[in-house]
Image (cartoon, coloured by chain):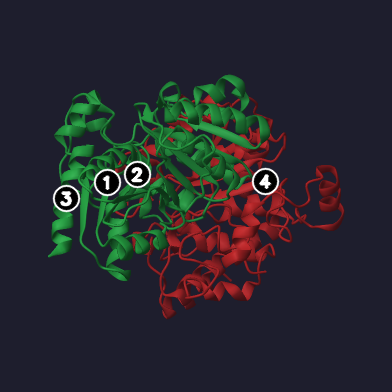
């Protein structure tokens, strides 16, 4: 299932070609594919732990990467990929799929972990992160990895991209939804607010922005580097329905996503309060692990904690 | 006869919009100037004004394109790629999405608005991006065809148009082929390779040179990228000297692209009609072309000097 080279170009040239018959596709999904595997709450929590283990192991093996901001968004992504999203790992470009757009592209290890767990590619491939000829690039790359919707890594661009995705859904009368995951530090970028303004202007109620609000960015705490607060008020002022949740509470997250589906005429912003490096004691709130991989001893210690 | 390339753009968009329901047009609060307002008038549901936010516009274009749309995004050439270069790089060029950035008000013939509105670096920026097809049509006839080709060809395009009306240099039956230079005048003594409004200036220069028995070939290199290497090599070997002419900075535009081919394949003396390392000021378009040495007379005198060099 190579998406590199000519194959990718060809597929992009007609991205929405297959499974165009919506009713048929939906029936197919409901009957044949476990796109919403009915995981119990405990199983989802266990899955979150599995994703954390993957993040630690893969960045460790790669010797570089961004564990901190990947770990903080684990529950957000778990709730989406195991409960909320309508998607099909067998047909990553299914036109009716909900789109998950990773705007904070440095959290690629998290995205790869969840895509592998959902069957987009083999779990063993996670070990190839950041290696030459791997499909798992250092930052998310839509031309390389099945299930990656957007090439990101240069911050601030994902919400704009998501607007385009949401507008296309409206034009095509498809009922899919677009979910953009942003970092809080990423909200320093002016483009985020251009996009925030435009999303409300276009009344995109099929668009959800999730801010992984872990309070930290490379140079320090948000409030010291560039104060974002009051962050929820800013989204509200830009015309968004705004929900604040504990970003490590799966139930709160799922409830927020479900609530967002009911909100009409405006987009929904979910401000998810999280902890950078969550789940590994010595990585939590430790900025050293924003963009540094754990060494062998640290991997061992982290995996011990994540048993 | 003169015709507006941006009017040709606006009208062609309407034609394309009628044929293809997947064409979507974006603008950044300049739709009256870029003439995308013509499309907006007929297809309001497929036109999105992004306001004065070019970075966001490019991202929206990418998202629409990733969802199967053929997207035209327009603003002034000074604002795209200048104002949104990284967005074009990461959201459009890297994934190779089907986004057509069509800008108007290229070069210094924007005139009185001055430096802030003169687009003289856009070609250098956009040509640096892998996968982009870059076109500077010579007139309205070619604009219409280039826009249609862009709509029919998957992948990122940049097409640069002008503010003032442009002299028509192509016959009504002209057929634009992307990636192919057009020989507008045969010649064996020297070649002038030009783009945009400089094509008609090159033809005027060739006419003057002919009066003195100098046989000057004129090529319109409307597709700067990918550039027609064969036409350049042929011009170098057959005429032995090349002058390039463009309404752009000397570095990174047409001249650089041609020189690269010439240096690699067939070194011959070259000269470059372009804006040297300065920003132009306010003035009337014609005054500026004279002030910054972008006229037929400049091409002519440069060609004469170059021929002397060639003969040494």
Q: Are marks 1 and 3 in contact (CB under 8 Å)?
A: no
Q: Chain of mark 1?
A: B
Counting from the top left corner in percent of width and height, residue A305 is at 52, 70
Which numbered disc, 1 or 3, marks the residue that appears first in the sequence? 1
Query: Label 1, on which residue?
Result: B245
Q: Which chain is green?
A: B
Cα distance between the residues tagged 1 and 2: 7 Å
Q: Which mark is residue B304?
A: 3
Query: Do the residues at discs 4 and 3 belong to one chain?
Result: no
How many callouts does the rendering have? 4
Counting from the top left corner in percent of width and height, residue B205 is at 25, 41
Query: Do the residues at discs 1 and 2 belong to one chain?
Result: yes
- In this view, the residue in front, B143 or B66, is B143
Select label 2 or label 3 by which is in front: 3
Query: Label 4, on which residue?
Result: A98
Query: Label 2, on which residue?
Result: B195
Colour used to depict chain A in the structure image = red
Cα distance between the residues tagged 2 and 3: 20 Å
């Amino acid at each position: 299932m190579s998406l590199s080279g000519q194959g990718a170009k060809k597929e992009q040239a007609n991205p929405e070609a297959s499974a165009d018959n919506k009713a048929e596709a939906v029936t197919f999904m409901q009957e044949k594919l476990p796109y919403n595997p009915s995981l119990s709450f405990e199983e989802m929590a266990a899955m979150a732990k599995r994703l954390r283990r993957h993040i630690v192991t893969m960045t460790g093996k790669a010797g570089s990467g961004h564990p901190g901001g990947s770990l903080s968004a684990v529950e957000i992504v778990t709730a989406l990929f195991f409960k909320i999203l309508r998607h099909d790992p067998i047909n990553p470009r299914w036109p009716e799929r909900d789109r998950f757009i990773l705007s904070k592209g440095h959290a690629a290890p998290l995205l790869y972990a969840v895509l592998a767990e959902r069957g987009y590619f083999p779990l063993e491939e996670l070990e190839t992160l950041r290696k030459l000829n791997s499909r798992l690039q250092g930052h998310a790359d839509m031309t390389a990895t099945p299930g990656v919707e957007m090439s990101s890594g240069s911050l601030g661009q994902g919400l704009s991209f998501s607007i385009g995705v949401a507008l296309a859904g409206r034009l095509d009368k498809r009922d899919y939804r677009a979910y953009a995951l942003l970092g809080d530090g990423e909200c320093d970028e002016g483009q985020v607010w251009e996009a925030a303004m435009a999303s409300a202007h276009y009344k995109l109620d099929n668009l959800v922005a999730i801010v992984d609000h872990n309070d930290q960015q490379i140079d320090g705490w948000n409030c010291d580097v560039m104060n974002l607060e009051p962050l929820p008020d800013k989204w509200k002022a830009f015309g968004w329905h705004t929900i604040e949740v504990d970003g490590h509470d799966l139930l709160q997250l799922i409830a927020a996503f479900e609530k967002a589906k009911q909100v009409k005429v405006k987009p929904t912003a979910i401000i998810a309060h999280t902890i950078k490096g969550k789940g590994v004691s010595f990585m939590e709130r430790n900025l050293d692990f924003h963009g540094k991989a754990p060494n062998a001893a640290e991997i061992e210690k982290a995996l011990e904690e994540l048993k | 006869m003169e015709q507006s390339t941006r009017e040709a753009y606006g009208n062609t968009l309407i034609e394309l919009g009628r044929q293809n329901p997947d064409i979507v047009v974006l603008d950044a609060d300049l739709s009256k100037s870029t003439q995308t307002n013509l499309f907006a008038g007929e297809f309001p549901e497929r036109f999105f004004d992004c306001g004065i936010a070019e970075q966001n516009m490019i991202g929206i274009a990418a998202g629409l394109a990733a969802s199967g749309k053929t997207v035209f995004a327009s603003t002034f050439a000074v604002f795209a790629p200048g104002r949104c270069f990284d967005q074009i790089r990461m959201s459009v060029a890297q994934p190779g999405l089907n986004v057509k950035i069509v800008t108007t008000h290229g070069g210094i013939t924007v005139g009185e608005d001055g430096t802030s509105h003169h687009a003289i670096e856009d070609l250098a920026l956009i040509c640096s991006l892998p996968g982009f097809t870059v076109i500077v049509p010579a007139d309205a006839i070619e604009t219409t065809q280039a826009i249609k080709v862009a709509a029919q060809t998957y992948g990122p395009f940049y097409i640069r148009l002008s503010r003032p009306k442009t002299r028509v240099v192509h016959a009504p039956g002209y057929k634009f082929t992307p990636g192919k230079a057009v020989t507008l005048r045969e010649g064996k003594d020297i070649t002038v390779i030009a783009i945009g409004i400089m094509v008609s200036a090159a033809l005027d220069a060739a006419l003057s040179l002919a009066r003195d028995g100098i046989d000057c070939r004129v090529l319109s290199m409307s597709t700067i990228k990918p550039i027609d290497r064969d036409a350049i090599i042929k011009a170098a070997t057959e005429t032995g000297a090349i002058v390039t002419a463009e309404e752009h900075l000397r570095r990174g535009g047409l001249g650089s692209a041609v020189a690269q081919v010439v240096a690699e394949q067939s070194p011959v003396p070259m000269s470059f009609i372009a804006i040297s390392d300065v920003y132009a000021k306010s003035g009337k378009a014609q005054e500026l072309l004279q002030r910054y040495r972008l006229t037929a007379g400049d091409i002519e005198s440069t060609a004469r000097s170059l021929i002397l060099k060639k003969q040494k």
